[in-house]
Amino acid sequence: ASFGLSAAVVDSGLAEVISRHVIGVFGGYHPWVMLAVIYLVTALSTEMLSNNAAAALILPIAIETAERVAELQGMPVDPRPYAVAVAIAASMSFITPLGYQTNLMVYGPGGYRFTDFARLGVPLAVLCFVVAMVTIPMVWQIVP
């Protein structure tokens, strides 16, 4: 189902529309800033969707955004760091019990509250964001 969603996002032109909107809001910024934006959008999506659905939904938008940033900045921008950011962020569902099956499995029997996940998950999500934003550009060059 996630791959069908991804294909629909591309085939319908939704990836291009959303990418244009993201570029319109953050267009004058460096490709690293756009990498952070893509990561954060994916991280927010994975808190409400499964990690597979979030990655399948955001990946075509991320690749389209990388291509548009390259056009706008007049420099080559490698889409691979954007894809890696989507993959990592989609796997970082710590803030809500909704984003990952195991969170839901322990939510009720463990007597946890929704705020327990946020209280512990936000610092962990911030740490993962910082590590990803430092590591991704070191391993995969954004601008070759």
Image (tube, rainbow, N blue to C red):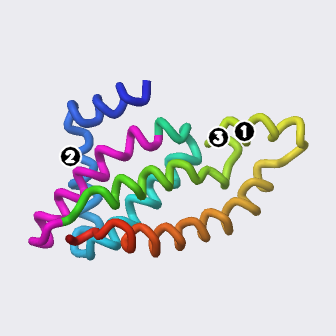
Rate crowding at label 1 as few (under 14), some (14 to 19) or many (20 or more) other CA atoms within 10 Å. Answer: few
Amino acid type at mark 2: Glu
User: What numbered label is drawn on residue 102?
Assistant: 1
> According to the image, label 2 marks what residue?
16
* Outermost residue to the front: 139
Q: Tell me if residue 6 comes above or below residue 42 in the rendering.
A: above
Residue located at (68% from left, 35% from top): 101
Single out the mark in the foreground, 1 or 2: 1
Disc 3 vs disc 1: Cβ atoms closer than 8 Å?
Answer: yes
Q: Position of residue 100 (x, y in %)?
A: 64, 40
Decide whether the magenta segment is chiefly helix, strand or loop. helix
Q: Position of residue 117 (x, y in %)?
A: 75, 54
Dot 1 or dot 2, earlier in sequence: 2
Q: Which residues are magenta?
A: 54-76
Q: Position of residue 68 (x, y in %)?
A: 17, 59
- What kind of element bears circle 1? helix
Position of the N terminus, as image quadrant, is top left
| Frontmost residue, 9 versus 101 | 101
